[in-house]
Image (cartoon, rainbow, N blue to C red):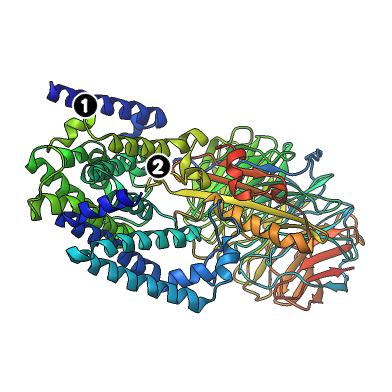
Amino acid sequence: MKQQALYAGVAAVSVIVAVLGFRANPQLLSYRQSYYKIVEAPPVASATVYKELQSSCQATAQYRYDERRTGVAPGTARPNSTVSIIKQIFPLNVDIHSASKSSPTVDDTGVYIGSDTGWFFKMDHDGNILWRFYLPGSGNGIHGSAALDDKKVYIGAYNGFMYALDKNNGDLVWANPVAQFIGASPLLADGALFISGETRHPDGLVAKLDCNTGATLWVSKWLGGHSHSSPTFDVKNDLILVGANSGRFFAFDAKTGETRWQQQLKGQIKGTPMIWDGTAYFGSWDRNYHAYDLKTGRSRWKTFMGGRIQTSLTLVPNSGIGVTNTKVGDIVGIKLADGEILWRLRHGDRNHQFSILVTEDPSRPNEYLAWSRCKKFQLCTLDAKTGKLLNNIDLPGSFTSVPFAWQDKIYISLDKNQGLVVLQ
Amino acid sequence: MIKFIGLQIEQIRNDFTLRLYGALLALTHLWTFFYWNRNQFFINSQSSINAEPICFPFFPNCDLFRQSISVDAWAHTLTFYLGFTILTVVFFAFRRTTTPAFFSLLFLTLMKFFLHMSNYNFMGNYHYMVYIVTALLLFAPRRRESLKVMIVGFYVAAGLLKINIDWLSGAAMIRTPALGGDLLVTSLFYVVFLELVLVFGLLHHKRWVRAITLLQLLCFHAFSWHIVGFFYPMMMFSVLSLFVLDEFIFNSKREQSENILLHLFSGRLGRSTYVVLIVFWLCQVIPFGLTTDPSLSGALRLSSLNMFDSKTQCHSLLVAKTEQGTVHLQKPMKNLGTRLSCDPLIYLNQAHQLCRANRDSKEIKQLSLTLFAKRVTEQHYKKSIDIKNVCELSNPLWAELYSGESS
């Protein structure tokens, strides 16, 4: 009798514990199959909304100008090749982190720029600060460039948060802790916001967010490494394209985040892919520039550049040419159809972190200017089709960001306490 | 009351095992001294030199109190604590000093409790269990029985908390264990089985069953040393020493028949033992009624053991609206261990202190706090705190009761 009472007690306790345990953890039953796959997919964060502010989610300006990341300024931005510095504005970057600095983003409402100290600024076109927003450390602040729509500015930071701010007054509209670090630039496309983020593993992910609420709509699978590459959108095939330090290049379905195709290269992919004529173009640390068919994911060509590629290719409109920098100290014009190198301007500056800006030449209709760093403290203007050097402009500091053209002005954020320069 | 205490002292005086156990429980204060004294942890925490100034919710301005006492005074306090510990151990060694031993252990425990409650940096299960065991030793009418049953209860509560992917996969480990792969997973399953089922062997009437159970528990704590450090195992060795003393060193006369296990389930233990058990288990269950995931909470799980059940990840948004603009404030980083780094109380303390400072300066127009947290094995973050205006709350440290998705 006593023994029976004991066994009954033990049995009752065991049953209760088992039931409670499995109810609390239903995945335990499938656990045996996946001991080591603790987290198969990246975490999905949620946003906090601070202010109701509905906007169009259509970009008025963003990194590399458009969703194909061509790097070509619109026709309204036509600075002269003989610009000179009209203003230098402090404070901005202090060189906490070696990654390329945040590039300014400019539209009709003003100039928007982040710094590696964690401050984000809005200035008027003359460089007067209108408002500022501060975000806390990761230690590295902001390195991506903002995306703007009609009412909001979107920026990610090295603390892993994506922020949407009210363009008028800098009020925080929403914030979403997408990842552990964000060094890339957000993309406004297809009525939503896309961003690549990084984790400590190290690994990376791409997320699609609702631009009005910040809600996470989907998160991609793990990229296999950090993603310094900003996402690009292919409207024809509805793809989001991004590269990663794992050497993998991904094409995700923009609606669902499912992987449509991916390729594995031998070198890291740090630059932002550019899209033109059904092809994605990007460089790699394998020292080649690559072209991949967007529909099939097959390689069209690759061209050896002599050094690691970290920049993005910039389109020269109406020419079938793309221009880029290389680590061996060249600016190169590449034929987009087959990767043939058409011209090379050797300048010897082996820093390869900055991409080139292309604008229409106001003095020569249908001709284009390429703006690039060509020495550590120089901005060069070239004929984008031929590579002929047109002008050198001395700067007070070096830069790793991309110049941004607006109307007849050029804005460049400099490294190491040299602030932001405005050229006209 | 005096008569009651006198009776407890007399019972302890007449039982060498209990006196020795009292000395071993006093030794837990010695381990506490070593633990608090390592790397100046106690001084740094009390003076907030190198630690976040964090408080329990029922003492929200403890940081002001602590900082009103000089660093030297805190150092002397710790020294006094050490000295009193040694004195207490010595008192328990002699029959004629049982009365001072009783009161000094009580004083020592209250002193530690007070220091503990004055600083959330000191939170931890190891203290919680020793308080209970000390209280039972000093005041429980059927102390031996209550102690043994309660110690088994600790393990069962701890085992229940480990029935999840985080523990069973090893994801909850704060350091990489010596075992890996399938051997690690098997041993983690075994620990749960040990704590939920085998541990009842400590109450079995057969001596060899008790011995094997005790040996397994001792081995478990010894093995855990390289993962959790010295303190937790040493505290548990002290707590478990009652079984060693009772079974193997002294053939002392027992209060009850040997079959505590059978009596436990057939209702034949003392009423006081059941009362203690019921209160203990109510405290364990309370957090599950207040929140969907106690491991992501701070204030809501204060009444219960919160074991090695999960590792958490989090993001915080403490946003201040000022005249100069909007500022997303820095999250606290000073020397927070794994168990505290995503504790909502850390962030609520920071917000509370900002609000307190802002009462005079009025620089901050609005302070909002959102904390997203999840277990490392989960994919989706949950909002464990979501407060639009923290400074409007009278005691923000209790904010988890009415804020967030996980409450």
Camera-side residue of A272 and B179? B179
Mark 1 surroundings within 10 Å by alpha-carbon count, few (fewer than 14), some (14 through 19), many (20 or more): some
Labels 2 and 1 touching (C-beta < 8 A): no
Residue type at tag 2: Ile
Quarter residue A139 falls in: bottom right
Task: Kindly report the distance in space between the C-alpha atoms of the residues bearing marks 2 and 1.
Answer: 42 Å
**In this rendering, does residue B27 appear at all?**
no
Residue B129 in sight here: yes
Image height of A111 relative to B67, above or below: above
Q: Which quadrant of the structure image shows residue B356?
A: bottom right
Q: What residue appears at the point 69 percent right and 41 percent down from the top-left corner?
A: A214
* Position of residue A377 measured from the top left corner of the image (x, y, whole percent): 74, 77
Check disc 2 and report its element: helix, strand or loop. Answer: loop
Q: Secondary structure at mark 1?
A: loop
Residue in view at x 88 percent, y 63 percent: A409
Q: In the shown orientation, is residue A171 left or right of residue B135? A: right
Vertical comparison of A150 with B330: above or below: above
Q: Is residue B167 found left or right of A164 in the rendered image?
A: left
Q: How many marks?
A: 2
Is residue B19 placed above or below B170 in the rendered structure?
Answer: below
Disc 1: host chain: B
Q: Mark 2 or mark 1, which is nearer to you?
A: 1
The vertical placement of A39 against A28, above or below, is below
Neighbour class for label 2 at 10 Å: few (<14), some, many (≥20)?
Answer: some
Question: Pointer 2 indicates a residue of which chain?
Answer: A
**Tag shown at residue B266:** 1
Residue position for label 2: A38
